[in-house]
Image (cartoon, rainbow, N blue to C red):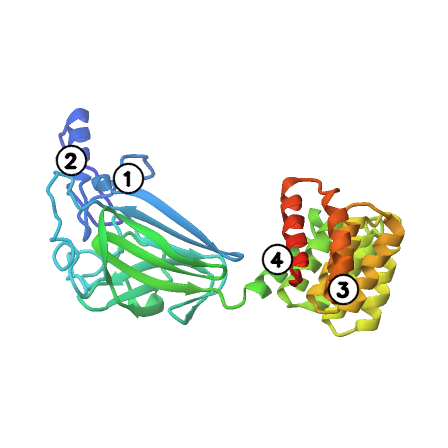
Amino acid sequence: MLTSPALGMHNLFPPRASVLDMHTLLRASLALALAGGAFGQFAGLTLPPSGNNQKASVIQYLGPVQVRIDYSSPAVHGANGKDRRGEIWGKLVPYGMSQPGGFGGGKPFPWRAGANETTVFAVSNDVNIEGQPLPAGRYGLHMIPGQEEWTIIFSKNSTAWGSFFYDPSEDALRVNVKPRKHEYREWLAYEFTTRRPTEATAELQWEELGVPWTIKVANADDIYVTKLRQELTNVPGFNYQSYVAAAQFCLQSGTHLEDGLKWAEAAISLPFIGQTNFDTLSTKAQILSKLGRDQEAKSAMQVALKQPGTTPLQIHQYGRQLLAARKNAEAMEIFKLNAERNGDAWPVHVGMARGYAALGDNKQALEHAQKALTQAPDDLNKQSLQAMIKALSEGQSIN
């Protein structure tokens, strides 16, 4: 006699069934309604999923945070081919709590938000669900359906089978959401329908219904920096480029600038690893500037510009940064420095054209733009310079 202790099921098969009979009966018994049914796996055996409710997973990253939903996916058409369209919500999946069926102590229980085993919602870091905090971890995902409103439950118990053993004392979070009409879906699925760098909308979709809820990461920059601190103590910490990349993250995000400065200095001076070059020095200079330490920033950048390996393009790009900061006179000084050091090298004349244009001298800007056009290394730069020459000829701004 086979039994399923987890479900409390006994006498699933006749005691004298042959191996063939038992195999046939086993396959027949694997049809699983949403509210209950037989296991698709017994005692660690690998067998087809109950009711052909295939297992599925969906993963979405919100910045550094992984969000994952593991579930079993039932179909609108039953295992016997019956079309249950129009009979899913409020019938096959009851509104409110399901009534006791002999499992889990005879208590009403919510829907397992899928089929077979408990649907699992997992997040690698703390998030906010519908504006409410949910700590990092794995949760059993349950739902209480309603015609106008659904309750989504995140249970600390993620290993129980289905919702039969659901215990409200194990709730980590409950949120209420509004269902919406959705285009027909034969198979139940979870999707991330709205995606932004640190937030998304997860949605259960089945038959002609969608049940969405929002997930947000409130402290993505803190998580990134925490990860960078950890990673720089391992293999990535043995090359200066990693420290430059970490410092640049702080610079671009405008956060944890003191950490960024520490990493920029490590990229320059860390024993056996540090390098004194334009990338390391200019990164330090930019962070110092962001911290309001302008004189130190200017000194560090002057050292960077004078490095033997500093290229015309690197000098040009620094000049462009100054233009973007509306420091036109300082930018012109950098473009002239590039001309003095590198003569007619590309993109010296492009910088001179932009510098003179920023100072209102379109005549000289046009002369340098025309020289630069003869040096354009590719079609994209050629087209950009042609547009620049046209704008300058018509007295228009190019910055």
Picture quarter with the C terminus: bottom right
Compared across the picture, whether 275 is left or right of 192 comes to right
Mark toward the viewer: 4 or 2: 4
Q: Amino acid at mark 2?
A: Ala
State the SS at label 1: loop
Q: Determine whether the residue tagged by mark 2 lies in a helix, strand or loop.
A: helix
Residue type indicated by callout 3: Asp
Q: Residue at x 79, y 73 (%)?
A: 293
Identify the residue under disc 2.
Answer: 28
Amino acid bearing label 1: Phe
- Estimate the spatial distance between the alpha carbons at disc 2 and disc 1, rounded to whole Å: 15 Å
* Residue 172 at least partly seen: yes
Q: Residues within 10 Å of mark 3 (few under 14, many from 20)?
A: some
Question: Quick one: label 2 or label 1, which is nearer the N terminus?
Answer: 2
Q: Quadrant of residue 292?
A: bottom right
The structure residue drawn at horizontal position 70% and vertical position 48%, both measured from the top left corner, is: 236
